[in-house]
Image (cartoon, rainbow, N blue to C red):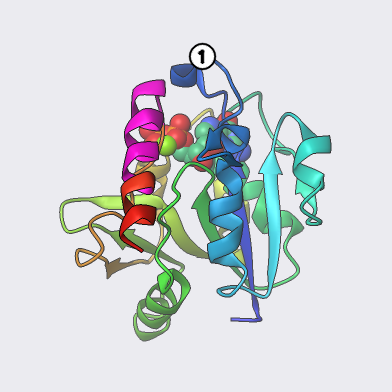
Amino acid sequence: MTEITGVILAGGMARRMGGTDKGLIQLMDRPMIEYVIASLTSQVGTILINANRNHEQYSRYGYPVVADIIGDYSGPLAGISTALSYAKTELVLTAPCDGPWLPSDLTHRLLKHFISQNADVCVAHDGDQMQPVFALFHKRVQEDIQDYLNAGERKLQKWLTRVNLATADFSDHPEAFINVNTPQEQQRVEKLLRNQNAVQ
Ligand SMILES: Nc1nc2c(ncn2[C@@H]2O[C@H](COP(=O)(O)OP(=O)(O)O)[C@@H](O)[C@H]2O)c(=O)[nH]1
Ligand SMILES: [Mg+2]
């Protein structure tokens, strides 16, 4: 796991959130990205934050903050490509900044299937569908992502059909992929976190 760079994707426009930078939105008085950092620190050797705004605020966590090297908000693939080009490790784990219940065994499970299937990419699967921003990527796919983006393509799910893809089952973690895209979801997630804290 020390050979893996974890990138937190915080580079979106957050249109559904009225444009407020999602990683910095408060959840129970903590910026949302802090939940992701707290979970990733024990799962990867080093962390990168991928953000296109508010670099000063993101840099206070002590990790490098990198802006997309391509496009003008071209979607998560631009962030993944950026992370793959900056990372000094062969493997890069991605997690979005808006998912506070990142599984504590995310890296472990993705890596297991990545290795056993000799994959280029391993994506988390929630039992119903793939969750492609929770994934492990080999650095060797960076050039192909770059070609794909340069051709004007944007869709991550469609790009995944170009590689040797493995999936890892997380259907036993129903909360793992809850993410906050709207103010309504922010309220709902805060409520869930409050209840969780009350139980603990
Ligand atoms: N680097 C980068 N990341 C992006 C961009 N657009 C979205 N993301 C990130 O990709 C992740 C998924 O985006 P989100 O809008 O939450 O989509 P959804 O939850 O799949 O509907 C989030 O972590 C975003 O910050 C972009 O243009 N550049
Ligand atoms: Mg989201």
10 Å crowding of disc 1: few (<14), some (14-19), many (20+) = few
Residue at 38% across, 66% down? 164
Q: What stretch is highlighted in magenta?
A: 181-193
Is residue 185 in the magenta section?
yes
Image quarter for residue 26? top right
Residue at 59% across, 46% down? 33
Residue that sits furthest to the left in the current view: 128
Name the main secondary structure of what is drawn in magenta. helix
Q: Which quadrant would the C terminus be assigned to in this image?
A: bottom left
Q: Where is residue 159 in the image (x, y as percent from the top left)?
A: 41, 46
Residue type at the position of mark 1:
Gly
Q: Position of residue 155 (x, y in %)?
A: 41, 36
Q: Position of residue 63 (x, y in %)?
A: 78, 56
Residue at 26% across, 66% down? 170
Q: Nearer the viewer, residue 74 or 100?
A: 100
Q: Where is residue 181 in the image (x, y as percent from the top left)?
A: 41, 29
